[in-house]
Amino acid sequence: MGGGYMGKILRVNLATKSAKAEPLDPKMAHDFIGGRGFVQKILYDEVPVGADPLGPDNKVVMAPGPLSGVFMPASGKIQFGALSPATGIMGDANMGGHFSAEVKYAGYDAIIIEGMSDHPCIVVVDDDKVEIRDAARYWGKGSAAAEKMIKDDLGEDFQVALIGPAGENMVNMACVSHDFGRQAGRTGIGAVMGSKKLKAIAVRGSNSIPLADPDRVYEQGRKMFQGCFAKPGFKEWTPLGTSGVTPWVNEVGAFPTKNFWTTFFEDHEGIGGEALKERIWLTDKGCFGCPTPCGKYSHTRVGEKAAYVEGPEYETVALLGGNCMLRTIEEVAYANYLCDELGLDTISGGAVVSFALECAERGIITEEQIGRKVQWGDIDSFEYLITAIARREGIGDTLADGVRAAAAKFGQGSEKFAIHVKGLEWSGYEARWAPAMMLAYMTCDIGAHHNRAWAITYDVAKGREEVEGKAAKVIELQRIRPSFDLLGACRLQWVEIGFEFEHYPDMFEAVTGRKMTVEELYEATDRVWNLTRTRAFLEVPGFGRNSDYPPPRFYEEPIPTGPGKGKMLTMEQLDFMLDDYYAQRGWDAKGKPTRATLERLGLEKCAQDLGSRGLL
């Protein structure tokens, strides 16, 4: 197997209350590397097509990567995945903190949770000792409150991943929380845990990670840390973290405002990184091995309401701040705290609340239906709506299924401003004046998410009116950025301070003993990308090109204010980019991988599955 891998997968069945360790398949390790690759491969192989995402056949898979937990910058990433209740296709979410390294130290390359418990439970993993314990006393508690209780009961050296009340109530945007402020936020993995009545998984390990060449790992790791510290962007970026990008995004006319109605927020200075640092920041907080801690531990007060919270990060600033029009960093941080404690993704949470506010403003939903008057920029309105969503109370029960499902129920044209792709709410970059970024959202394999291809800087640098050449850049980024998700490392050093990507294949060879070129790593990301795309065609009747279009607001309504005023991408431009993208991906005109592409990537099973259903 080589270094970097522990050689075992832990399988926990909540229905039979059993757990067993299984050997890691060397071919899966070779072809899918780890992390997101393992998650998606296991889901594809083990969750039957047509399974209910909140039913007994779905599984929660969590996997670190071969570089997780080793001596190098920011090697603390882990991937969570399941068939997504938000989208109906395979989903995954990335989480930092310290859980990833602990899973490796406990001796596992992945943990599979299957079956459904008949009562609230917690899985406790202590090296090769695995217990399924009753969790009644934690059920109903907020994420931070429950994590503290679990650590008090088990010990501080356990690392805990858990859900809040939103996950317990199977809210489609429920996240998995960890370390009092880290989240696997996207695609509703927390809801799947809730359906299984799994409140938490706690892990403690005492093993060492095998290394092919320990001396080379140490030298390469030292070189990487020193390289990060020497980058000019290190001192500029670290103090503010991701929230520091707020004024730039607003300046270039890409800041989501008022449910993506416009792209410029006049009050952005009151919610960005400088305001955070000056008014609520207490200390920096980093993940495992991180030299550039983006976490900003803060204390906020809004009237009589006060809270400690990690954040807000940029995405939270954008979706809870500009998009819901909260105008002070104190209000955004308090909204962040509410989402964290309830166990809700702040991206989808902010998008759903802003959608509800626009529906209320337009009279599509009434004050009587909502239960009170709600309005933009009002923290009490936000708290009322987000709490109703987490508890599935009143109109919150409809909103808890996400904007796509809510628009289908509300009707009256609301689908035009239900901002999502494939059922996943749009994250923090408005893209009517950013064609590469628009295409990145449209083609992201799990739905509208920025982390697979953050292309807005390319648009700004290369021209925002031009659509030619944008597909090639998006695909390039969709190869580079997901590579980090396979390896189990954070991408922020590369993207924010310009740390060279070539260091990571070098470290991979030092750790595993396997030489892998950058091109071979890209091929592995293509393999995962085509696997997830194939499953979407198998899972959703009629899936294809129409599934990749953005909501009508983005091609029917020009930007009304700010530097992007009057800008909009046309349907013709969207189709041009999709045609170019599909061709370069080796897909047909509907966006379906061809047999030749699948076979080139070693995905013969995918081709057989499509063929057996008359889709290829």
Image (cartoon, rainbow, N blue to C red):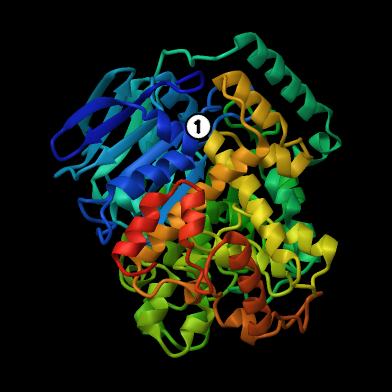
When the figure is inspected, residue 389 is found, relative to residue 413, above or below; the finding is above
Identify the residue at horizontal 65%, vertical 86% (top origin): 557
Kindly indicate the quadrant of the structure image that contains residue 331. Answer: bottom right
* Residue 389 point in image, percent of width and height: 38, 64
Q: Quadrant of the C terminus?
A: bottom left
User: At which x and y percent is residue 293?
Assistant: 67, 34
Is residue 179 among the parts visible in the rendering? Answer: no
Q: Vertically, is 92 above or below 8?
A: below
The vertical placement of 266 against 5, above or below, is below
Q: Is residue 97 left or right of residue 531?
A: right
Residue 300: x and y, percent?
60, 47
Mark 1, Cα crowd under 10 Å, few <14 / some 14-19 / many 20+, is many
Quadrant for the N terminus, please.
top left
- Front residue of 36 and 411: 36
Between residue 371 and residue 123, name the one nearer to us.
123
The answer to which of 505 and 133 lies nearer the viewer is 505
Residue under the point 61% across and 44% down: 522
Q: Give the side of residue 213 with respect to residue 49, left or right.
A: right
Residue 513 place in picture, x, y as percent:
57, 19
State whether residue 420 is above or below residue 53.
below
Q: Residue furthest right?
A: 232
Secondary structure of the residue carrying tag 1 is loop
Q: Which residue is denoted by mark 1 in the rendering?
A: 65
Residue at figure coordinates x 59%, y 51% from the top left: 333
**Which three-letter amino acid code belongs to the residue tagged 1?**
Gly
Q: Is residue 377 visible?
A: yes
Front-lying residue, 491 or 412: 491
